[in-house]
Amino acid sequence: MKNNKIPNFLYEMLIKQYGENLTNEIVQGYSYNRPVTIRVNTLKTNYENIISKLEEMHITYKRVDWFENALILENISEYEIRKLDMYINGEIYMQSLSSMLPPIILNPKENDNILDMTAAPGGKTTELATLSEDKALITACEKNKIRAERLKYNIEKQGANRVNVLIEDATKLNDFLSFDKILLDAPCSGSGTLNLEDEKLEKIFTQELIERSQKVQHNLLIKALKILKIDHEMVYSTCSILEEENEKNLQELLQDKRIEIIPINKEKYKNIKQLPTKIDGTVCIAPNELYEGFFVAKIRRII
């Protein structure tokens, strides 16, 4: 049964893509008030130290089976977290569980030359730095000057020393640039993260937004494949659950044999509720009580 708070056109799109039962689960998933989730910043501290501090403050937590440095906090708000020394000092970073996945799937290594194409506010950028033990060389691209300042602030606060911020529209990057790995967490409609209580939702979330997002995503993908080294890998992700912004952006590139999909190990993420995808090896996370809706694909450039 349709929830009256969801835009009609979106409900119809979801029904067409997922069927009525899954669509109703998705709509229910939008309504959850998710707990605070944090990532331990191993450039400044370690998991055991943060656990000790949480227990001292009687903050209850749960571990995340697919990422040792992720924690679900059960009895504290974001507002309260922001006042803690461990947050102020950059020892932890508040980040949704879904958004922690793309850097893990990209798998940054020492001396990798990595581009984060749309990097602000810096959660994934600094996660890339921690995963590589600050030994990868990361270029964080952000076209908006105000958002770029926030990105710089978070990079410095997290102690990521090998990140260079580039204030530039990523679609206009010089084609002679060359990267070992690219993270493209593309701007999107946000169809995986909707707040149905937002009174402005009907005005903000429109068909035009989806179409505009798809064009931007396409242009970013085309640019990424020009500056990613041949036979090297990138991750494409969005916080959308619509195939228009996800699989359809990849299908043309697959048909032209410009890319191949590197299958994501779904067994590793078996405890995360996943939606069916039109491309094998990609992952689409269902919005629920712990996760935002999110799409992730790992790609290898062929030509």
Image: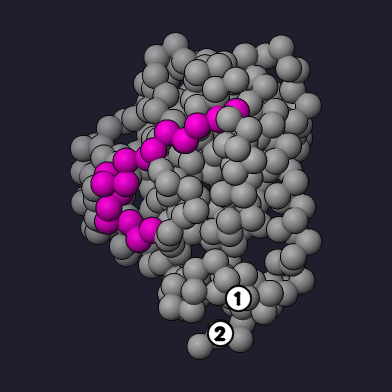
- Using the rendered view, name the quadrant where residue 192 is placed: bottom right
| Magenta region includes residue 267 | yes
Disc count in the image?
A: 2
| Magenta region includes residue 114 | no
According to the picture, the residue beneath numbered tag 1 turns out to be 11
- Using the rendered view, name the quadrant where residue 2 is placed: bottom right
Q: What crowding class fits label 2: few (fewer than 14 Cα within 10 Å), some (14-19), or many (20 or more)?
A: few
Residue 235: horizontal and vertical position, in percent? 51, 34
Task: Check residue 3 in the rendering and tell me which mark sits there, or answer none.
Answer: 2
Name the side, left or right, on which 83 lies relative to 178. left
Task: Check residue 276 in the rendering and tell me which mark sits there, or answer none.
Answer: none
- Toward the viewer: 279 or 49? 279
Residue at point 47%, 15% (across, down): 112
- Any part of residue 300 in sight: yes
Contact (Cβ within 8 Å) of mark 2 with mark 1: yes
Residue 30: horizontal and vertical position, in percent? 50, 71
Name the side, left or right, on which 120 lies relative to 286. right
Residue at point 62%, 70% (across, down): 13
Q: Earlier in the sequence, mark 2 or mark 1?
A: 2
- Any part of residue 161 in sight: no
Q: What crowding class fits label 1: few (fewer than 14 Cα within 10 Å), some (14-19), or many (20 or more)?
A: some
- Toward the viewer: 148 or 299? 299
Amino acid type indicated by mark 1: Tyr
31 lies above or below 92: below
In front: label 2 or label 1: 1
What stretch of residues is rendered in magenta?
258-274
